[in-house]
Amino acid sequence: MKNSALLIVDAQESFRHRPYWTDTDLPAFIKQMQALIDGCFAANVPIVQILHTEDNGAFALSTGWVRTLEPIKVKPDVLFHKRFHSALEGTPLRGWLIARGISRLIIGGIRTEECCETTTRHASDSGFEVDFVMDATMTFPTRLSRTERVFSSTEVKERTELVLASGQFAHIVTVQEALARL
């Protein structure tokens, strides 16, 4: 299999301090994310942690919340702070990956449809093969302001799966499938 790296996108405490936070999907996410981290570590796959930062609010470094979401345990090979939705924009991530000959990214984290999906699309357009590990992502119910309809986190994740797979941006995989591909 191609030289791979795990990208853990925005699995951080900042989200607990946002008004849309809910613990509903948290236990499953923690279990799957930890299994993915542990599996990649055991296979000597580099682990890249990405944390989102902003000047103010829950994502400001000064809050102390820009750190790994508890109780996830990870010792990343490298950590990058980002200010954009894509982890490849405005960070040295692309150069870090290229310098190590990495051509395949395994992506999981928080929010499925925002930073995880955007990073996936950007990575695909940049020539990387991507395994999008759906069961190692988490998101929240979202309201469409035009119609006031609330989409469940499951519906949001299904929409992400639909557009990533149909556009051939990524292989949609489970944790077990991603680890088996190593």
Image: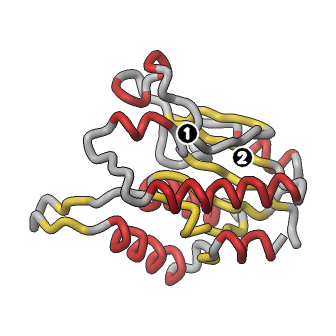
Residue 4 screen position, x and y as percent: 81, 60
147 left or right of 90? left
Quadrant hosting residue 91: top right
Closest to the camera, between mark 2 and mark 1, is 1
Q: SS for tag 1?
A: loop
Residue closest to the eye, 17 or 28: 28
Residue closest to the eye, 70 or 112: 70
Q: Which residue is mark 2?
A: 94
Vertical arrangement, residue 15 with respect to residue 29, above or below:
above
Q: Earlier in the sequence, mark 2 or mark 1?
A: 1
Mark 2 Cα shell of 10 Å, populated few (<14), some (14-19), many (≥20): some
User: What residue is drawn where x is 49% and y is 52%?
Assistant: 110
Residue 58 screen position, x and y as percent: 38, 29
Q: Which residue is mark 1?
A: 70
User: What residue is drawn where x is 55% and y is 63%?
Assistant: 121
- Regarding residue 118, the answer to whether it shows in the image is no
Residue closest to the eye, 117 or 149: 149
> Disc 2 marks which amino acid?
Arg
Q: SS for tag 2?
A: helix
| Residue with the most extreme left position | 147
148 left or right of 31? left
User: What residue is drawn where x is 50% and y is 83%?
Assistant: 166
Label 2 – label 1 distance at C-alpha: 27 Å
User: What residue is drawn where x is 65% and y is 35%?
Assistant: 80
